[in-house]
Image: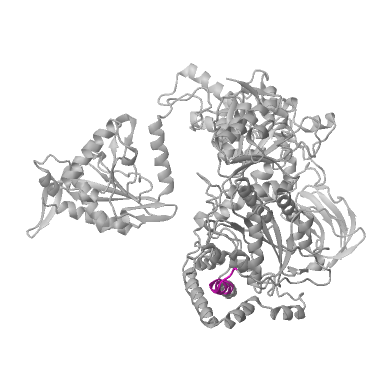
Amino acid sequence: MATHVADGSERANIRLVPNSLDLEDRVRLLRFMLLMRGVEDRAMHLYRQGKVPGSFYDGYGQEAVSAGAAYALGPADRLCVLHRDLAAHLVRGASVARILGQYMGRSGGFPAGRDANVHFGDRELGCVGMVSMLPDMMLVATGMAMAFKLRDEARCALTWVGDGATSRGDFHEALNWAGVQRLPVVFVLENNQYAYSTPTERQFAVDPVQRATTYGFPGITVDGNDPEAMFEVTRRARERALAGDGPTLIEALTMRMHGHAAHDDMRYVPPELLAKWRERDPIALQEGRLTDEGVDVAALRAEVTREIEAATEQALAMPMPDPATARQGVFAVGEAQPLGDGRAPWSGFHPEAPHA
Amino acid sequence: MSSLPTDASAVIVDVVMPQMGVSVAEGLLVAWHKQVGDWVLADETICEISTDKIDTEVPAPASGRVVELLVEQEQTVPVGSVLARIATDAVAGDPHPDEQGPVISRVTPSGPPPAPQRPSPVVRRIAEREGIDLARVTGTGRGGRVRKQDVLAYLQDRERADGPAPGESAAPPAPLHIESPYRDEPLGQPLSRMRRTIAEHMVRSLHTAAHCTSIMEVDMSAVEAARAGRGLTGLAFVARATIDALQAHPELNATLEDGVLTRHADANLGIAVSLGEEGLIVPVIANAQELSVQGLAERIRELAVRARAGELRPDEVSGGTFTITNPGSFGTLASTPIINQPQVAILDLEAVVKRAVVVTDDQGDSIAIRPMTNLCLSWDHRALDGALAAQFLATLRMRLQDWRSA
Amino acid sequence: MPELTYLQAISEGLREEMRCDERVFVMGEDVGEFGGAFKVTDGMLQEFGERRVMDTPLAESAIIGAAVGAAVVGLRPVCEMQFADFVACGFDQLVNVAGKMHYRQGLAVPLTVRLPSGGGFSGGPFHSQNPEAWFMHAPGLKVLAPSTAEDAKGLLIAAIRDPNPVCFFEHKHLYRRIKGEVPAGAYETPMTARVARPGTDLVVIAYGAMVWTALEATEDLDGASIEVLDLRSLVPLDTAAILDSVARCSKVVVVDEANATCAAGAQVAAFIAQHAFEHLDGPVMRVGTPDVPIAFSPPLERALLPQVSDIAEVCRELLAY
């Protein structure tokens, strides 16, 4: 696997030609991205209607980073999902109604209203919900990978991390630990160019993907808006991990097309930059490809819209949590239940009977 | 001007330039008698002012610490201007906020306490309970304060002199009755394991469920007639009627756990069995709906025998969906049973007593002697409401009062 | 029954659990080859292998964060902070990731963090702290602090078996200074308080090394009968035992080796003031270390940490009140 070396002036996009996705997979990738965008769009409406308390964060324009990467993971793999990676939850099988209920703080949401809207994870599907301190979850993913290695299990852990979070100590502690112990962990660095209002020029003096080599393992930069490239590079990283070759840092180049959160008008982002990235929208890219293959994209969109509408109704019917339960659940009682397995829709995990 | 930092919750009182005369509009500050940080008592002179009418000393409006002086010497300000501010919740002798007070606490000796002295909570409590006049107790505490041992010693002496007061215990105050395995001398007899289990379950039930009890009077004549000569207990009839009522009102054949209400198709009927002094146990008749009155009677008898012999299996005391208890055989008329968690209701069958009751038929009202009993249903208000409980009891009563032998 | 030092008891507890539960493993700095800075894990690498006795990089945040990851996929990590003081580097992972996980997501985090705490041997400000209160204050963490060898073993086993994150404060100064009879085999000590010495006139409430200081100070104090209550568990706090002791003795002295402001003793004192008011025959007194970093030079350190004479003096004054 090639290690990317930045030349300082421009980042080369590695266009990987995936041969491991069949048409159904490629349609599913689009579907997950459409679902993510649609759910977040709906949530934003609900937010403006006062039904989503607190703030709301979305991953508009970054859908491929989570859809593509999560699509490469097996059911026994484990994920730490961040706030702009909704498609990862969807790939693993999280219920859309529960996600919307979660945003609205309803009792049917994953933590039943205990943690903020985007900080969720369905533990039964192998997803750990994030904390606000970033990139704390990198260490949790490292620890999960460590456990897999200690038990000789053919599984990996994967987490996303933002460009801003690469400045904090936990980023370095995680890369160092993963490198020195050669752990089966994949770090997806979601470089969307801005950490709130801080552009990358103020965040690091080197391309963060270079840091991987300094910690002893490869880093690779990829077009984060190409879901198939994201899938392929993650698949390879996973193979490396399962082969015992250690971690990989994948830098997914993308752009945060909306503000940091619903309350941010992102006036600090130059409009030309947004315009340039708008032309590379991941959903438009995938739709174009599939239309060329004769897929009825409009029908897919309509189906996704229907699914979201049905889920919204379900979510709106969920009651708010009972205040009497506010103090419950601080401590676990009885036997600790570990994370469960999630869905793994990639066709590569479900080999067909050999063709005649 | 100078000021002292105060916290937002400090109670601040302003010192204002007084109006010394109807036509006076302003005043001159002649001299400050206090500086920032000083303690001032109410009515103590805080400054001197001069107006064209009069020179005067200004008394402080309240006691406290001077936290701000806003006007300088020789400065003239309009009447009503704030001259200074006092923090009235400061306490004289408190350290300045910048000082670090000693943390290793000492009980500061402050000389004899001012009379009359307030007794400490425990001394007051003992004195009230035992009817002791504290003025007669010699205090050996600081400054002559009455301590707990003083009042206890007084009590002992009084007892020796008078003997224990009739009907009153002269024992030293009992500690809070909290079980502690670490005390050397346990008070009384520790509860047996079974009693402790029952105790825990009962307390937990009371703390978990919102207990209400509804009572229904039932005329048991029909049941008595059906029973006659068959050698079956009334309990078996009540059990069968209960099952029928549960089938008509399935909301009561339910369990409530962690906010989840589960209705059960089968009636797994728990029947409370007394084990005498040791306690009680509730064996469960699984799928009781399949049994006739006869079948129920036999099963109840069999379970009771095995219960008293300690031969019940774990699966025979679990999985219950509704419980019936029957202490009435000892003659009680009503009670408020405690729900057997996690069920939502429990039925208590009281004594059947011959009473004079009013009966109405097509001849009008008359008085008859009927065997009456009270069915007491305790139910969980979290899971259901009074109307439903009442309906259940009404169905149950109807079933019992209309009993025809099959 | 064998007599073990406090340190040996901890080692034995860890060993027992490692033997009977293969999910348990140790991770920390210098715990493997070197056997641990205090030799608690001496010999364990040889017995259990390097997968179960892991020498980690010098990274407290990573030690705890990785432990969280391992715990949520079914293992039972026992992390060692070389000194309790260094847990500050991993504070975020412990308080925000481990502590809040179950409340937020229903996901249990069965990890244990061993924390050699306490001063009294010229360790200076960064090797002498008692930071229990930081974690008492963080919802979702349990906090234990045994004072005897028997309890050290039993509470460590209880901590490892608990499905929650547990901070296990082992007082370094007790490691080799105290010995006791320790039952063989695996046993769990309940997370409750223990009456170290029963009494009637006054109760001194303490935990960790201060239990021994309190016992010494009140052994023979003008013939008074003084109870010493060893808290053992700070979260959960055994409020029933506290109320029981206060109800019987009516006079209370609460001792903290930690810096006094908002220390564990402050919580105990507040609780007593609210719930045992009617049983009090005097103000609730506290003896604690002032809010000063623990100094290195012996006369300074002695002036800061509560000494036998400090406790005795406060007890005398309260008895006389």
> Tell me, what colour scheme is on the image?
one colour
Q: Residue furthest left?
A: B363
Judged left or right of residue B70, residue A292 is: left
Q: Is residue A30 magenta?
A: yes
Give percent across and percent down for residue C313: 73, 26
Residue at the (60%, 47%) spot, across then down: A152
Residue at the (24%, 33%) spot, across then down: B305
Q: Is residue A289 magenta?
A: no
Residue at the (83%, 47%) spot, across then down: B38
Quarter holding the N terminus of chain A is bottom right
How many marks can you see?
Answer: 0
Judged left or right of residue B122, residue C291 is: right
In this orientation, does residue C207 appear? no
Residue at the (59%, 59%) spot, across then down: A115
Q: Residue furthest right?
A: B74
For residue C145, which quarter of the picture? top right
For residue A82, which quarter of the picture? bottom right
Give percent across and percent down for residue B128: 51, 32
For residue C268, which quarter of the picture? top right
The answer to which of B50 and A113 lies nearer the viewer is: A113
In this orientation, does residue A201 appear? yes
The answer to which of C20 and B230 lies nearer the viewer is: C20
Q: Residue furthest front?
A: A356
Give percent across and percent down for residue C49: 65, 37
From which residue to which does the magenta span run? Answer: A20-33
Give percent across and percent down for residue C75: 58, 45
Judged left or right of residue A62, residue B218 is: left
| Rendered position, A153 above or below B157 | below
Magenta region, mostly helix, strand or loop? helix
